[in-house]
Image (spheres, grey):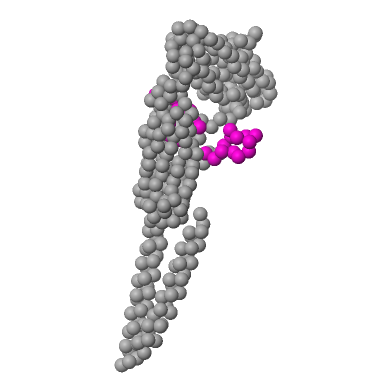
Amino acid sequence: MKQRVRNNHWGAILPLGGAFLSLWLVLAGALLVRGPLFLAQAAGGLELAISPPLLTVMIKPGHSLTQSFIVANRSQRPVYLEARLVPFQPRGLTGGIKLEQQLPANGLHFSLANANRRLREPFLLAPGQRQQLVLRLQADAQASEGDSYYTLLVEQTWRGQFLPINTSRARIAVGANILVTVSQSGHNQARLEIAKLKVSRYFNDWGQPVRLLAVIANRGLNYAPLQGEWQVSGWGGLWRRRLALRPDNVLAQSQRQAVCWQQNRDNAAKLAGQTIPCQVKPWLPGYYQAELRLGGGASQSARVHFWLIPWRELLALAILVGVGYGIKKGLGAKGEGRRK
């Protein structure tokens, strides 16, 4: 009789355990972006575009250079515009900027090389028309070495009969950022460091993504693009993932949060890429480490650690064990009753 009761007990427990194991196996098996132009839209149907949206240059004192920008009116109405240079400073950790009012006295001078265009001089842009602006940068022989950051701002003027009729007096503007490094030697003096490194949680639920956060500081005199990757591993290297950093520019004496991206494998578009979340989703419970490695001239690395624990699955297992124990006691009580 005892043997039959024991067999009934295992007959009740094994299907439940098998169901839990099947569920676990099913769950375990489910595993300064640069574009060609910058667009601006405003109420009233106005739409402007400028290309290229970003210019990075290194210039020696006493030299000059020129760069062409294309401004396009993509709307169905004409608009009066004017172009001007505005300095800016980095703001926040996501690549934001703060425009300033006055140009610094650093020995850099900007002008338009167009025969019929001047900075701050209004010009008319018809619907669908494009205007080339040839910007000239001249560095004095005594120009201060270091970085200066500007925006070539092209904005609507209050001239002519093509103004918005609403009372908000809102004007449309579009801009291209210009990062200028003045250097006699031609060497970049950026110094990138890992200022902050963390994961979303030290103990993470199994099946949930683990977010990776990194803030990079530039302690040097010049801007530099991010180069590097996250390397996440667990179970002695059995599980590995790599996430490349998007090559955003970190301006001098500023900080920026690192963004991950997946590069295009097509050779014709190898500079293109798709921004992806800086996160991983391991499927093996256990201990993991995430290492951030900076490349280029930085050559620095740092690590953080985290655990992946199947809390809900452990709770389900505990419930199954409890149910099995209850079934065992119930079957044992029936066996005792029959013997009596």
In the rendered image of this protein, does residue 53 appear above or below residue 116? Answer: below
The residue drawn where x is 50% and y is 39% is 244
Q: Residue at x 35, y 76 (%)?
A: 326
Across and down, in percent, residue 24 comes to 46, 63
Which residue is depicted at the point 32% across and 88% down?
A: 336
From what the image shows, is residue 23 above or below residue 248?
below
Task: Please check the rendered image and state whether residue 270 is part of the magenta-colored stretch, yes or no.
Answer: yes
Viewer-closest of 154 and 250: 250
Residue 76: which quarter of the image?
Answer: top right
Residue 189, x across and y down, in percent: 43, 21
What's the magenta region?
Answer: 247-273
Write down the quadrant of residue 284 in the picture: bottom left
As displayed, is residue 224 above or below residue 115? below
In screen coordinates, is 94 left or right of 173? left
Q: Nearer the viewer, residue 240 or 136?
A: 240
What is the quadrant of the C terminus in the image? bottom left
Residue 124 locus on image (x, y percent) = 64, 15
Asked whether 249 falls inside the magenta stretch, the response is yes
Q: Position of residue 120 (x, y in %)?
A: 55, 11
